[in-house]
Image (cartoon, grey):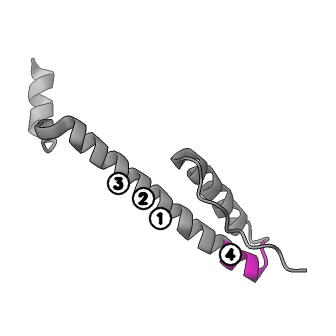
Amino acid sequence: MAQAPVTGPAPASFEEAMAELDKLVGQMESGQLPLEASIAAYQRGSELVKFCAAQLDRVENQVKLLEGDMLKPFAAEDAQAGSDE
């Protein structure tokens, strides 16, 4: 008997997507899924990765907007100079 596809609605949050992705990876790594279910799990995992990447991009853009011109590259020299004071 074939299993239902693993695809589903968009997750409610980044954390929910990561939890579902973790569960899918565990199922796939166990080797217990039939071929069709493995393919469906891979497809769902791909959807979740895209969702998470979009969420991270959105948050990064929000941080850039909030920080404005205050953002600057981290330099090891700056960190050492701050610890010497």
Q: Which corner quadrant of the image does residue 32 belong to?
A: bottom right
Q: CA distance from mark 2 to mark 3?
A: 6 Å
Q: Nearer the viewer, residue 29 or 54?
A: 54
Circle 2 SS class: helix
Residue type beneath disc 2: Ala
Q: Which residue is mark 4?
A: 40
Dot 2 alpha-carbon crowd within 10 angstroms: few under 14, some 14 to 19, many 20 or more: few
Residue 2: x %, y % from top left: 85, 80
The magenta region covers 33-40
Residue type beneath disc 3: Asp
Kindly identify the residue that appears in the image at 68 percent across and 75 percent down: 40
The reply to whether discs 4 and 3 touch (Cβ–Cβ < 8 Å) is no
Q: Which residue is mark 1?
A: 50
Residue type beneath disc 1: Lys
Dot 4 alpha-carbon crowd within 10 angstroms: few under 14, some 14 to 19, many 20 or more: some
Q: Which residue is mark 2?
A: 53
The reply to whether discs 1 and 2 touch (Cβ–Cβ < 8 Å) is yes
